[in-house]
Amino acid sequence: MPNHPEHGDFASSQAMLMAKACRQPPAAIARAIASHLHPEGTYIASVEVAGAGFLNFRLKKDWLWEALQAVLLEGPAYGRSAGGQKKRVLLEFVSANPVGPMTVVQARAGAIGDSLANIMQAAGYAVEREYYINDAGAQVNAFARSVEARFRELAGESVPFPEDGYQGEYVVDLAAQFMAREGNTLRALEPEERIRYFETAAIAEMVRRQKDELERYRVRFDHWVSERHLRSSGALEETMEILRSRQRLYENEGATWLQTTDLGDDKDRVVVKSDGTYTYFLPDIAYHRDKFNRGFDILIDILGPDHHGYVGRLKAAMAALGFQPERLEIIIHGLVRLFRGGELVRHSKRHGDIVTLDELVEEVGVDAARFFFVMRAPDQPLDFDLTLAASHSQDNPVYYVQYAHARICSILRQAEAEGTPWDASRPVDFRVLTDPHELALLRRLADLPDEVVAAANARTPHMLARYVQDVAALFHLFYDNCRVLTPEEPVRRGRLALSVATRTVIANVLALLGVEAPERM
RNA sequence: GCGCCUAUAGCUCAGGGGAUAGAGCACCGGCCUCCGGAGCCGGGAGCGGGGGUUCGAAUCCCUCUAGGCGCACCA
């Protein structure tokens, strides 16, 4: 794709690439290629040799007009393609520990993961979304003891709060909920029994809350996989057996180690501690093995920046099991810093003053939150300006795009009020669309299927966030230069068609990003 | 100390090895008898330093500098 209009609609650098092999100057090769091309009967209007040996192709306007026809015909399906060849992809994201509220870190992972799943689906991949529930291990026990302590406080007892307990107000709230619901039954239990009960019931309640919170954020999962079930299924022992039979395990200082160093990891890793219990690493290996065994071609994990040390060992573990490690893709997303009124918002988990997903949605709305999180490349750090995201102003890119959509809807309402509503069944004479602003917009609309594929293959939604801003800008430009509801009939109809197509493209992209396309604002 | 990531306009960021490196914000100046002015038009400045690979490097490799983040028989 050339950067400048005078370089045509498509360009090829093939001549330069061939120059060495052919022992000919690139320009001469380009001229030779050009003279052997027979563009008659194709969309190609002209071929020219330019610069150091570029072949620039100019397309007939028929091509653009047919692209417009395709947008109108395909509607909500426009932008979809089959490039992914129905490869089965399992996308795991968020997977927050069920011992606390969702934070802005999970908010970013959620926005990226859900959008990426949408985009890869549109590009022809068979994507399933999965949430891994860490409902086993030491932190679950610590959480249950925290709830239990709060429960006894509510019952009027004076008890010491666990040293490694969870301080947050939500724990008190949770204890109160159990007190109200089944206080009498629970009070009759021994403390240890209550703790065991909370390990299941309180965690289940936390997962339910997380599910609801994500639902409000328009993020849904196909599968919720429990670590506890994985453990009780015998998958860990099975994984150990396979690693042992593949001779990847050895004993040292009373612990069992997995040999990963020769597979790209910095050091070997303990999988069974000297006290006989498993490290957190083994369930993760077993879990990823299970994912592969379910028949997926590609596994994608989206993890926070604090986990990037984890990539090497997990890939090494997959290699140790005999899976191709490149089929496990790990996206590490960048840090999120919150700003309000230009000031950095301090939020630390330790002090319990975190900003939760719900609070974020409350403050800026789902649309702005989702859009802001996918505006940047996933691996880049992100400064999230809460004041900007919450503002209904031209500075806010979400509203800029949504405004373009609403404006088109308004034009269509106006057309209807004038007694000439848009009627998709009547033919359009596309030849009236010749203004540079019309053609520039149309050219961009024609890019959508390629943009979706590019974003899917690069595993990043931010390309589409930028694309849709571009489309909105081109629409506003068109709008200011070409009056849509002009009395001249064929022109009016052509411009209405272009407007409808633009609305379709904006709506389709916003849908992929999980953002609403309002008809009025 | 080891490893990973980052460095592009005053600020926040795009840039899928190609031609003259792009947006938004901020700043200055214009545009409403007209379909939504939440809009549009015009105006300046930039690839951290140094090597290399290539016909061609912001992009790939090495190195230096400056930031960020990780380096548990925690999860």
Image (cartoon, rainbow, N blue to C red):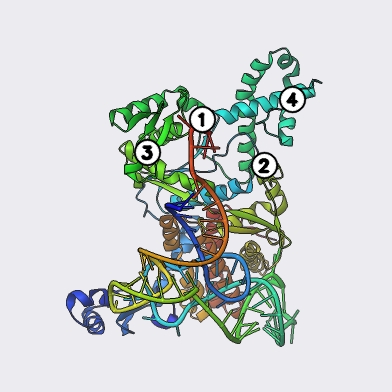
Pinpoint residue A518: horizontal percent, then vertical percent.
64, 58
Q: Which amino acid does label 1 sit on?
A: Ser
Q: Residues within 10 Å of mark 1 (few under 14, many from 20)?
A: some
Q: Which amino acid does label 2 sit on?
A: Arg
| 3 or 2: tag closer to the N-terminus | 3
Q: Residues within 10 Å of mark 4 (few under 14, many from 20)?
A: few
Pinpoint residue A260: horizontal percent, then vertical percent.
35, 40
Q: Nearer the viewer, mark 1 or mark 2?
A: 2
**Considering the image in quadrants, where does the N terminus of chain A appear?**
bottom left
Pinpoint residue A345: horizontal percent, then vertical percent.
70, 54
| 1 or 2: tag closer to the N-terminus | 1
**Residue A297 visible to the viewer:** yes
Q: Nearer the viewer, mark 4 or mark 3?
A: 4
Per the image, the residue denoted by label 3 is A317
Q: Residues within 10 Å of mark 2 (few under 14, many from 20)?
A: few
Do pointers 1 and 4 mark residues of a single chain? yes
Eyeballing the image, is B11 above or below A276? below
| 1 or 4: tag closer to the N-terminus | 4
Q: In the image, which disc is placed on residue A226?
A: 1
Per the image, the residue denoted by label 2 is A350
Per the image, the residue denoted by label 4 is A160
- Residue at mark 1 to residue at mark 4: CA–CA distance: 31 Å
Mark 2 residue element:
loop
